Amino acid sequence: MTDVLKTNLDRDGDQRRFAAHGYATVAYAGGLSVLKGVFEPGWRWSADIAPIAGTESCQTRHLGYVLSGRMRVVLDDGDEHDIGPGDLFDLPAGHDAWVLGDEPCVMIDVSPEATRYARPAGLAGADDITMAQVRRGYAAFNAGDSQTLRELFTPDVVHHVPGNGPLSGVYKGVDNVLNHYAHIAQLTDGTFRANLIEVHGDGQGHVVAIHQGSGTRLGATRVSRGSILFTFRDERVCDLMELGADVPGDEAFFA
């Protein structure tokens, strides 16, 4: 018999007070973890969270939904976005934010990284250098930046693609791997993205990245989860072992 796992976010959650102007509550039930943020008027990350986090900007990626109120987000590169009721958001690490108006901004965050929001200062960074390199690689892949990928990969890099479909197989050497990525872009008219969800590392040159892939081909859009086990040599990727949550579905999409 499979257990039903249930908890109450407001009653059972771990409440983390900001320096001022609100709090975040983190709760979990089995494989689901959720952060509920209540950001009161006057709240600003650089004033209310930075003293706790000890970083110049928020280094947590957020995946969530705004229940009420409004907030402005400014990325480290100066790009600005407003989010409000009903908005779904995927905010990258590296940003400041503040509440707009006189109404509290209440939101739900389901990002795996949200469990370390308002993390105490003084701890070592969550990412080691290889984990940071993987994040950089995903950004480069989605931007079609083959030069950055070439810098991140060893010349003899190997990428293993599961299954028996048209893209399945073992791609050996950086040129063949990059040509494989270019082929994916060609088949999807440049729409394919691998949006990073979570990164795990062991500090010994092994990193697992969980992502959500999406793309449109021949008028059909597919969204599926997958992961890649990266092996590093001298801080460069030498092997990628790709895994899929629905390999037959992926094969059918590219057939």
Image: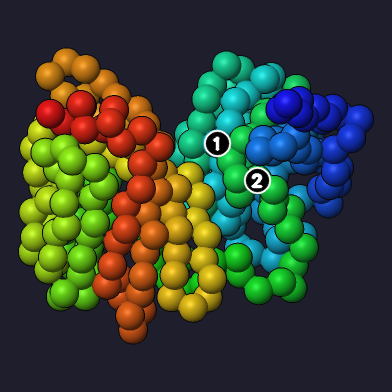
- Looking at the rendered structure, the kind of residue marked 2 is Ala
Disc 1 to disc 2, how far (Cα)?
Answer: 8 Å
Residue lying furthest bottom = 234
- Foreground of the two, 230 or 152: 230
Q: Which residue is mark 2?
A: 114
User: Where residue 52 sits in the image (x, y, percent)?
Assistant: 77, 60
**In the visual, does 41 lie left or right of 31?**
right
User: Where residue 87 sits in the image (x, y, percent)?
Assistant: 54, 21
In the rendering, which numbered label is found on residue 236?
none
Which image quarter holds the N terminus? top right
Q: Which residue is mark 1?
A: 63
Q: Is residue 77 above or below residue 239?
A: above
Q: Quadrant of residue 102?
A: top right
Residue lying furthest right = 11
Query: CB of mark 1 within 8 Å of CB of mark 2?
Result: yes
Residue lying furthest front = 1
- Foreground of the two, 130 or 145: 130
**In the visual, does 158 lie left or right of 205?**
left
